[in-house]
Image (cartoon, coloured by chain):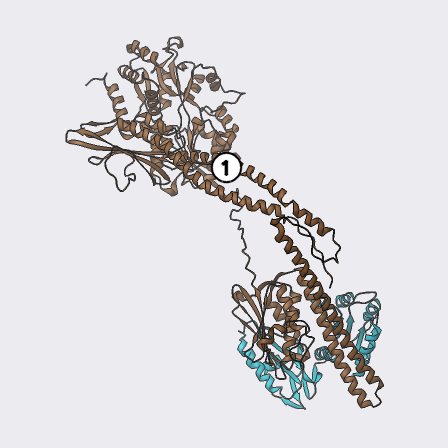
C-alpha cells in the first residue's frame, strides 16, 4: 500500500476559526446588550408616547362638566390633535362615570381589574383587535348629589411606540455593531501576529523529504508547544502505521508465496510420482491447494478493494433490504450453499425499507464473506439465518450459523488479519477483517456474539439514513385571468364621475367586471359598519373624510402596498390603509347675474360682514349643505370652526340671512344657476369648477385666507373578497394614468395635476390665488364624530338657524 | 450440446475446452471478438461462453449485437473483474449467467447444464433429469416410467419452476405466475402447493429448495 498525500482542504483556516469564535463571543455580548437595549428602548418609547396619552386625557378631563342630565364632556380638538402626533395610530376613547355609566365614546373598553378611583393617570396595555396602550384618569366633579367620579379612558395602538422603540434600538445596536467590528479588527490583527510561529513550523514540514519521519526540532512558543508535541506524536504514529503497512505487505507476500510453494510442491511430487494412484492423490491435494490459493488471492484483492473504497468515501443512499435480497438470491445459486438451510428474516423494519448511506459493492463483499464464513464453519447440516432489522437510529444486518462459534475471548482476535481461530476450517484469515473494514468504512459497528443456533452471530449495525424531508412546493395558485372576477365598490360618488376610471380599469384587467353601488356618505358609513363579513365590498370610496377615518380607526381596513412613487402626499393618506386620490377645495359659488366678483369678500372674516351688510338682499338666497344629511357639509363646517374664530359668527349671520340647506351639491349648483341662490358656500370645488366652465352665469370664488380642501378617499375592507384587485384599483387611481384620467374625463380634480394638457377646471384652479388648506386624514377628524360633540354642534347649528324664524 | 467458447487466453481456453469436450460437448473456440461476432452471425450454438476482455470487440458488444439481432442463445459471461458493476451491465446486456475468474470447473459445468436444460425444456417440450421426465405438451410427469399423479396447479407450478431452473423466485413472483388476476393469490396456498409438489418429487433429482424469507429455487441434484 502506498502512502497517499492529500491536499488540506481550503477554508479550514485557524485564523478564521479564532476570529469566528471571537465573533461568536462578540455576538453573545451583543445579544445580551441588545436585550437590555431593547428593554430600554421599549421603556423610553412608552414614556414618550404615554405623555401624549396623558396630555390628551388631561385636555379631555378639563372639558368635563356637569349639566342637568349629569356629567358631560365637550371633546376638545386639541386632544385628538395631540394623539395625532403619533400619526399612524388608531385611537379609541370613552368617558364614563361609575354613577351614570357610559357618557361618550366606545363603550366597555377594558379597564384594569383593580381599578380604584384616582386622579392619578393609570397606564396599561390591553388587547382589542390589536395591542392598545391605555390611559385611565379620573376627576371628581361636584354635583347636586355630591361628588361624582368621571373617568377618561384613551387608548392608542402601538405603531408609533414600536417605530420609536425600533429606531432607538437600531441606533444603539448599529453603534454597538460598529464598535464590535472595530474590536474584531483588532482581534484579527492580534491573531495574525500570534499565529506567525505556525508558519515557521509549516515551512519546516514542507522542506522535509517524504521518508524523513523524525520529530521536528525547535523551541516553540509556549502556547503552541502542545501543537508541536501533537505534530511530533502524529509523525511517530505515521511511522508506526507505515511499519504496519510494510508488515502487511510482507504478510501478503509471505502468505501468497507459501501457498504457491505448497501448490508447486504438490505438483512437483505428482510429476515425480511413479505410481498413478500416488500421482492422483498428489494431484487431488494440488487442486485443493490451488483452490485455497485462489480463495486467498480473492480475499486479498477484496480486502484491498474494500479498504480502497472506504478511503474514497463514496457512500450513497442505498436500500439495504433490496441489496441483501439481491445478493442472497445471487449467492444461493452457488452449489456449495445447497446443503445449508438459509432463511432471511426481516423484523421491525420501520417503513419496510432499510435506507442507509453505503457503498453497495463493499456491503455485498461483506455479506458474501459473512455467508462464506457461516458455510465454512457451520458444519454439515448447517442452518444460516440472515436477519435484517432495525429501529429509528440503526439498521442491523445479522448472520448467524449453527457452527461452533467463537469463544468470547477470541472474538477480538478474529477480526485481525491472517488469524483463523479454528485451524481445521481456516480460510484465508481475512474474512472478518474485510467485514470489519466495511463496517468501519460505513461508520457501522461489527458485533460478534453467540447465535441461538449455537454458532457465531455477526452483526453489522449501520446508522440509519434519516428520511429526507421533502419540501413539497405545491403550486396553489393557478393561472389567473381566465376566470371572471368581480370588484365590488361601494361609494359616495356619482357613478358618472367614476365611470371613466372604472371602464379604463376594466379594460386593463381582462375578465374583470366592476359592481358599483352608490350611497350617501352617512348611509355608506352605516352600511360598512353593519355589513356581514361575506358581503363586504372590495373597496369603499367616500368624500366624507372623517367618516372614512372613523372606519379605518375601528380597524376595518386592510394595509395596502402602494408603490412609493405613487403615494399621495402625507395629508392624503393614513396608516397605509386610507388613500385620498382627489383634490377638491371648498368653493364659494355665486350667480354672476346677482353678484359680481369684485364685490365678493376675500376672507372668512369679510364673508360674515359681507352677508350681514346685505342681509335683506341675500335673504333666502344663500345656500349651504344640510349638516344633518350631508357628511361633506358637516366635515367642512366642523373644520371651519377649527380654522376660524369667525365660524360661530358666520353661522349666526347665515341663520339671520335665512340660509337654505341642501342635501346635495348638484341641487345647490342648479339653484345657483337658475338664480334662486345668489351664492352657495362650501360647495365641493370639483363640481363647482366644472359647472362654472359650462355655465356662463356661475362664478367660482376662493378666499384669500384659507380654502379647505377635501380629498375623496378609498380603503379596502379587511373582509374584502377580492383585496388584490381592489388594491390594484387604488394603485391605478393614484397612478399617472389614473390621475390624468381623473383630470380629463371626470368632474373630479386629481391630487397632482399633470403638467401639460390641463383641463379647464385645473387651469382655473391653477390661476386662483387662494391658499388651499387640505384637511388631513387622521385621528384629528375624530373629534367631531364624538356623539356629544356632534349633538352639541348640530344643536347649536339648528339653534342659530331657527333664530330668524322665531318662536 | 454445441457450444462456442470465446476466450483469448490460450491456456485457460485449452483447459475449458478439454473439460467441456470431456463431458461430451462439441465446443468451438474463438479468440477474437470481431471474428466471434461474425461466426455467431451465421452459425447457431446451444450455448456461448463469452469472455469480456477480448481483442477486436469486447464481449459486451458481441453480446449486445447478438441480442439486437434477436439471437436468444444462452450466454454465460466470463470475467476477471469482481466488481459487481460489470456483472450487472453484463446481465442487463442480456447475459443469462456470469462467472468470475478463477472459477471452479465443476461449477461451470453445472451452470452450463442448467442453461442447457432450460433451453432444451423450452424447445423440445420434454424435460428429463435422471429417472424424471416431464412432457410439457401432455402435461404429464413420469418417474421411472410411472405416471406421477399431479393436480393442475402442481403441473403449473412444476412448469414455472422448470422455466426458472437455477433461479431464485420469490413467493410473490410464484403467486403472480400461478394465479390469474381475478383469483386472490394466497401466499399460504403457494407454500402448501410447493410442499406437496416437493413430496411428490421425492426420489427424483429435481429439488425445490426453500430459502425462508427469500423464495424458492429449483435445481437438478444430479448435475453436481
Residue located 74% across and 57% down the image:
A212
Query: Chain A hue?
Result: brown
Please provide percent x and percent y for residue A291.
Answer: 74, 78
Q: Is residue A11 above or below residue A728?
A: below
- Name which quarter of the figure residue A461 lies in: bottom right
Q: Label 1 crowding class (10 Å Cα cut-off): few <14, some 14-19, many 20+?
A: some
Please provide percent x and percent y for residue B51.
Answer: 78, 70
Q: Chain of mark 1?
A: A
Please provide percent x and percent y for residue A679.
Answer: 35, 15
Residue ID for mark 1? A176
Q: Relative to the observer, which residue lies in front, A642 or A531? A: A642
Residue located 31% across and 21% down the image:
A661
- Name which quarter of the figure residue A417 lies in: bottom right
Query: Chain B hue?
Result: cyan
Q: Relative to the observer, which residue lies in front, A630 or B193? A: B193
Please provide percent x and percent y for residue A801.
Answer: 26, 19
Outermost residue on the front side: it is A219
Q: Can you see residue A524?
A: no
> In terms of secondary structure, where does tag 1 sit?
helix
Q: Is residue A287 above or below residue B33?
A: below
Amino acid at each position: 500500500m502506498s502512502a497517499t498525500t492529500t491536499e488540506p482542504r481550503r477554508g479550514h483556516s485557524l485564523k478564521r476559526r479564532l476570529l469566528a469564535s471571537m465573533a461568536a463571543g462578540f455576538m453573545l455580548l451583543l445579544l445580551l446588550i441588545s436585550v437590555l437595549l431593547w428593554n430600554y428602548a421599549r421603556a423610553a418609547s412608552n414614556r414618550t408616547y404615554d405623555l401624549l396619552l396623558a396630555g390628551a386625557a388631561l385636555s379631555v378631563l378639563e372639558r368635563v362638566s356637569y349639566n342637568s342630565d349629569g356629567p358631560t364632556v365637550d371633546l376638545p380638538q386639541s386632544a385628538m390633535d395631540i394623539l395625532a402626533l403619533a400619526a399612524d395610530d388608531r385611537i379609541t376613547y370613552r368617558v364614563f362615570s361609575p354613577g351614570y355609566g357610559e357618557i361618550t365614546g366606545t363603550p366597555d373598553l377594558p379597564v384594569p381589574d383593580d381599578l380604584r378611583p384616582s386622579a392619578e393617570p393609570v397606564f396599561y396595555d390591553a388587547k382589542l383587535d390589536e395591542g392598545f396602550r391605555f390611559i385611565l384618569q379620573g376627576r371628581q366633579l361636584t354635583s347636586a348629589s355630591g361628588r361624582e367620579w368621571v373617568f377618561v379612558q384613551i387608548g392608542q395602538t402601538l405603531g408609533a411606540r414600536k417605530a420609536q422603540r425600533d429606531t432607538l434600538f437600531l441606533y444603539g445596536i448599529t453603534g454597538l455593531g460598529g464598535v464590535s467590528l472595530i474590536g474584531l479588527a483588532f482581534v484579527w490583527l492580534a491573531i495574525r501576529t500570534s499565529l506567525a510561529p505556525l508558519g515557521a513550523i509549516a515551512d519546516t514540514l514542507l522542506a522535509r523529504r517524504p521518508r524523513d519521519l523524525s520529530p521536528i526540532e525547535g523551541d516553540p512558543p509556549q502556547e503552541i508547544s502542545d501543537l508541536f508535541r501533537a505534530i511530533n506524536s502524529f509523525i511517530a504514529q505515521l511511522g508506526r502505521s507505515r511499519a504496519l503497512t510494510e508488515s502487511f505487505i510482507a504478510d501478503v507476500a509471505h502468505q501468497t508465496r507459501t501457498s504457491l510453494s505448497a501448490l508447486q510442491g504438490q505438483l512437483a511430487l505428482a510429476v515425480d510420482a511413479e505410481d498413478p494412484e500416488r500421482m492422483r492423490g498428489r494431484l487431488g491435494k494440488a487442486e485443493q491447494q490451488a483452490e485455497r490459493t485462489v480463495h486467498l488471492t480473492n480475499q486479498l484483492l477484496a480486502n484491498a478493494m474494500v479498504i480502497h473504497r472506504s478511503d474514497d468515501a463514496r457512500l450513497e443512499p442505498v436500500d439495504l433490504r433490496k441489496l441483501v435480497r439481491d445478493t442472497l438470491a445471487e449467492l444461493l445459486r452457488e452449489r456449495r450453499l445447497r446443503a445449508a438451510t438459509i432463511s432471511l428474516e426481516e423484523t421491525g423494519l420501520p417503513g419496510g425499507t432499510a435506507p442507509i448511506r453505503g457503498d453497495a459493492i463493499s456491503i455485498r463483499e461483506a455479506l458474501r464473506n459473512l455467508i462464506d464464513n457461516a458455510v465454512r464453519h457451520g458444519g454439515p447440516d448447517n442452518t444460516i439465518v440472515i436477519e435484517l432489522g432495525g429501529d429509528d437510529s440503526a439498521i442491523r444486518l445479522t448472520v448467524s450459523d449453527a457452527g461452533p462459534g467463537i469463544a468470547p475471548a477470541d472474538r477480538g482476535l478474529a477480526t485481525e488479519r491472517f488469524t483463523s481461530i479454528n485451524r481445521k476450517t481456516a480460510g484465508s484469515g481475512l474474512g472478518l477483517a474485510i467485514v470489519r473494514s466495511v463496517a468501519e468504512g460505513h461508520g457501522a459497528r461489527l458485533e460478534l456474539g453467540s447465535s441461538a443456533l449455537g454458532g457465531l452471530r455477526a452483526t453489522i449495525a449501520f446508522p440509519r439514513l434519516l428520511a429526507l424531508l421533502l419540501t413539497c412546493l405545491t403550486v396553489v395558485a393557478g393561472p389567473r385571468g381566465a376566470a371572471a372576477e368581480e370588484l365590488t365598490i361601494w361609494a359616495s360618488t356619482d357613478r358618472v364621475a367614476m365611470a371613466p376610471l372604472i371602464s379604463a380599469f376594466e379594460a386593463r384587467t381582462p375578465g374583470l367586471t366592476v359592481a358599483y353601488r352608490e350611497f350617501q356618505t352617512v348611509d355608506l358609513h352605516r352600511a360598512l359598519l353593519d355589513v356581514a363579513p361575506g358581503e363586504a365590498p372590495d373597496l369603499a370610496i367616500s368624500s366624507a373624510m372623517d367618516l372614512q377615518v372613523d372606519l379605518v380607526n375601528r380597524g376595518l381596513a386592510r394595509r395596502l402596498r402602494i408603490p412609493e412613487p405613487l403615494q399621495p402626499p402625507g395629508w392624503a393618506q393614513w396608516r397605509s390603509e386610507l388613500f385620498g386620490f382627489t383634490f377638491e377645495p371648498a368653493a364659494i359659488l355665486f350667480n354672476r347675474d346677482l353678484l359680481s366678483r369684485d364685490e365678493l369678500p376675500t376672507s372668512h372674516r369679510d364673508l360674515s360682514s359681507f352677508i350681514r351688510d346685505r342681509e335683506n338682499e341675500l335673504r333666502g338666497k344663500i345656500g349651504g349643505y344640510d349638516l344633518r344629511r350631508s357628511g361633506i357639509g358637516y366635515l367642512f363646517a366642523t373644520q371651519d370652526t377649527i380654522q376660524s374664530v369667525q365660524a360661530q359668527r358666520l353661522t349666526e349671520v347665515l341663520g339671520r340671512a335665512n340660509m337654505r340647506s341642501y342635501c346635495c351639491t348638484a341641487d345647490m349648483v342648479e339653484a345657483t344657476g337658475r338664480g334662486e341662490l345668489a351664492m352657495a358656500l362650501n360647495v365641493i370645488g370639483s363640481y363647482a369648477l366644472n359647472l362654472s366652465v359650462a355655465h356662463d352665469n356661475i362664478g367660482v370664488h376662493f378666499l384669500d385666507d384659507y380654502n379647505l380642501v377635501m380629498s375623496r378617499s378609498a380603503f379596502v375592507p379587511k373582509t374584502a373578497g377580492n383585496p388584490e384587485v381592489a388594491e390594484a384599483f387604488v394603485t391605478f387611481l393614484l397612478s399617472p394614468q389614473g390621475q390624468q384620467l381623473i383630470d380629463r374625463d371626470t368632474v373630479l380634480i386629481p391630487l397632482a395635476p399633470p403638467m401639460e394638457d390641463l383641463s379647464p377646471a385645473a387651469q382655473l384652479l391653477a390661476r386662483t390665488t387662494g391658499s388651499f388648506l387640505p384637511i388631513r386624514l387622521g385621528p384629528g377628524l375624530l373629534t367631531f364624530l364624538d356623539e356629544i360633540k356632534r349633538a352639541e354642534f348640530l344643536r347649536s347649528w339648528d339653534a342659530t338657524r331657527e333664530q330668524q324664524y322665531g318662536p | 450440446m454445441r457450444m462456442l467458447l470465446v476466450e483469448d487466453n490460450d491456456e485457460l481456453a485449452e483447459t475449458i475446452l478439454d473439460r467441456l469436450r470431456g463431458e461430451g460437448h462439441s465446443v468451438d473456440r474463438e479468440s477474437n471478438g470481431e471474428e466471434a461476432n461474425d461466426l455467431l452471425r451465421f452459425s447457431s450454438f446451444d450455448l456461448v461462453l463469452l469472455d469480456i476482455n477480448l481483442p477486436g470487440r469486447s464481449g459486451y458488444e458481441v453480446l449486445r449485437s447478438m441480442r439486437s439481432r434477436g439471437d436468444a442463445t444462452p450466454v454465460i459471461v466470463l470475467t476477471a473483474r469482481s466488481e459487481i458493476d460489470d456483472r450487472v451491465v453484463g446481465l442487463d446486456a442480456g447475459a443469462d449467467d456470469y462467472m468470475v475468474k478463477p472459477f471452479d470447473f465443476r461449477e461451470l459445468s453445472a451452470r452450463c447444464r442448467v442453461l442447457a436444460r432450460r433451453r432444451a425444456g423450452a424447445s423440445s417440450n420434454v424435460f428429463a433429469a435422471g429417472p424424471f421426465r416431464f412432457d410439457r405438451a401432455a402435461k404429464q410427469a413420469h418417474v421411472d416410467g410411472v405416471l406421477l399423479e399431479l393436480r393442475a396447479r402442481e403441473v403449473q407450478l412444476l412448469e414455472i419452476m422448470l422455466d426458472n431452473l437455477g433461479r431464485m423466485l420469490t413467493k410473490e413472483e410464484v403467486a403472480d405466475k400461478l394465479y390469474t388476476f381475478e383469483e386472490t393469490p394466497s401466499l399460504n396456498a403457494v407454500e402448501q402447493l410447493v410442499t406437496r409438489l416437493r413430496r411428490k418429487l421425492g426420489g427424483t433429482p429435481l429439488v425445490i429448495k426453500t430459502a425462508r424469507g427469500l423464495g424458492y429455487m429449483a435445481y437438478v441434484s444430479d448435475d453436481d
